[in-house]
Amino acid sequence: MLDEKCIFCRIIKGEIPSAKVYEDDWMCVFKDVEPKAKVHLLAVPKTHFKLIEEAGEDGMEMLSYMLTKIPAIARENGCENGYRLIINQGEDAGQTVFHLHIHILGGEKLGDL
Ligand code: 5GP
Ligand code: ZN
């Protein structure tokens, strides 16, 4: 289920342009508009939920599917020497888009968090 007002749902639907690097029936991966590393991708499930605990059974299946796909996608997009995955969850983490997404950061030696 997608949400009309959500920016990532609108990117998934193609209503807002993005630099997509991968897409299939379950997920979409596109470049972050404000990259925090040389490579900064966002992996987004094609269903709208904010938090891991809201994923439900289907969402959890989607997340585990995404994790199986991410290594090759990261490698093919410049993260041959490793990468960092981040999922910001809620206010203290600074989550700004309330559609769960996995940040993929790499393409260079990353600093400490
Ligand atoms: P959060 O802080 O919620 O974990 O991360 C949201 C991320 O989405 C931020 O890194 C931000 O730069 C990115 N972002 C926000 N709006 C857009 C957009 O319209 N297009 C793309 N490609 N990235 C976006
Ligand atoms: Zn959404």
Image: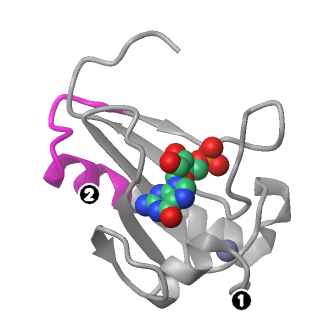
Scheme of image coloration: one colour
Q: Would residue 78 be counted in the magenta stretch?
A: yes
**Closer-to-camera residue (14/41):** 14
Residue at 60%, 79% (x, y): give it: 9
Residue at 68%, 57% (x, y): give it: 97
* Quarter of image, res 90: top right
Instruction: Check disc 2 and give the amino acid type.
Output: Ile
Secondary structure category for the residue under label 2? helix
Identify the residue position indicated by label 1 in the image: 1
Instruction: Say if 74 sits above or below 100 in the image.
Output: above
Relative to 68, is 21 on the left or the right? left
Identify the residue position indicated by label 2 in the image: 73
Mark 2, residues whose alpha carbon is within 10 Å: few (<14), some, or many (≥20)? some
Residue 69 placement (x, y as % from top left) = 36, 62
Residue 92 placement (x, y as % from top left) = 82, 30
Instruction: Say if 74 sits above or below 15 in the image.
Output: above
Instruction: Check disc 1 and give the amino acid type.
Output: Met
As measured in the structure, the alpha-carbon distance from the residue carrying label 2 to the one carrying label 1 is 24 Å
Q: Give the residues drawn in magenta, as a range.
A: 69-83
Residue at 37%, 83% (x, y): give it: 24
Instruction: Say if 10 sits above or below 113 in the image.
Output: below
Q: Would residue 95 be counted in the magenta stretch?
A: no
Residue 67 placement (x, y as % from top left) = 46, 55
Is residue 37 visible in this depiction of the protein? yes
Task: Respond yes or no on whether mark 2 lies under 8 Å from ligand 1.
Answer: no
